[in-house]
Amino acid sequence: MNNNYVLKETFARLFVIATTNKMNLSSFSYLLERSDFVRKIETREYDDYFNKSLINIFYDITGITINTDNSYGVYNDAYWCGYSYFEIFLRTKKPFSYIFLKMPLVKMMDIYPIYHEMDISSLLEFFARQEQEKTILRALCEQIRTSLPKLSAATGIALTTLSKYNADDGALYKASFQNIFKIVNYFHAPINLFAIEV
């Protein structure tokens, strides 16, 4: 199913199902970015998985069983968020874990009233500004309220090295695999977060 429109529609409707079933937004994006569904999209592994019903895909992602899919024809804020995330993915080629880290779902919902009627280029400009606000490492540290000295003590990575990563994503992208692996384990982050593009 290498059809971006269909994939985008499917992606958007998963957000509708999540909000309709009162799922916590942070929990949903956490599970989604680590799912087979997202992995297959990022690696362009378009196989029979995408012939499954949306209910089954939602179950695979969340472990939540729902009996009815009421997402058809719903074009609300949740739909717009899913649709917009997929557009950002297509235009930037960044992994979903990176996109969610730089623009969390809660933030995306907050900007819906302003951006949902604008051209996608306005949203892309907003995302570009979000990218510059915090580096990957700074955003990860803020998520779990940890500090660089604590991270250094836990991983054995020198504080001066972590400070470089914290100041510039470019430095982090050039980090050794050993250091990336330690950071991934510490934050329980998906490894593809550290890919420049997918």
Image: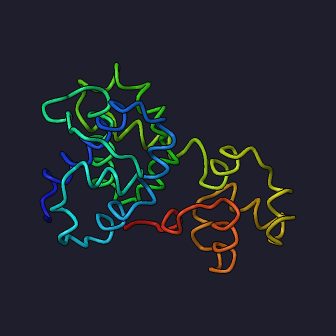
User: Residue furthest toward the top?
Assistant: 113
Q: How is the image coloured?
A: rainbow
Image position, residue 104 (x, y; %): 49, 40
Which quadrant is the N terminus positioned in? bottom left
Q: Is residue 111 depicted above or below 129 in this figure? A: above
- Residue at 38% x, 54% y: name it: 61
Image position, residue 176 (x, y; %): 65, 79
- Locate residue 20 relative to residue 192 in the image: left or right: left
Image position, residue 182 (x, y; %): 70, 72
Q: Is residue 193 depicted above or below 135 in this figure? A: below
- Residue at 35% x, 60% y: name it: 38
- Residue at 14% x, 35% y: name it: 72
Q: Nearer the viewer, residue 192 or 24?
A: 24
**To which quarter of the image does residue 18 belong?**
top left
- Locate residue 63 relative to residue 84 in the image: left or right: right
Q: Is residue 6 depicted above or below 78 in this figure? A: below
Image position, residue 133 (x, y; %): 58, 41
Q: Nearer the viewer, residue 193 or 122?
A: 193
- Locate residue 157 relative to residue 50 in the image: left or right: right
Q: Nearer the viewer, residue 69 or 182?
A: 69
Which quadrant is the C terminus positioned in? bottom left
Q: What number of labels is visible? A: 0
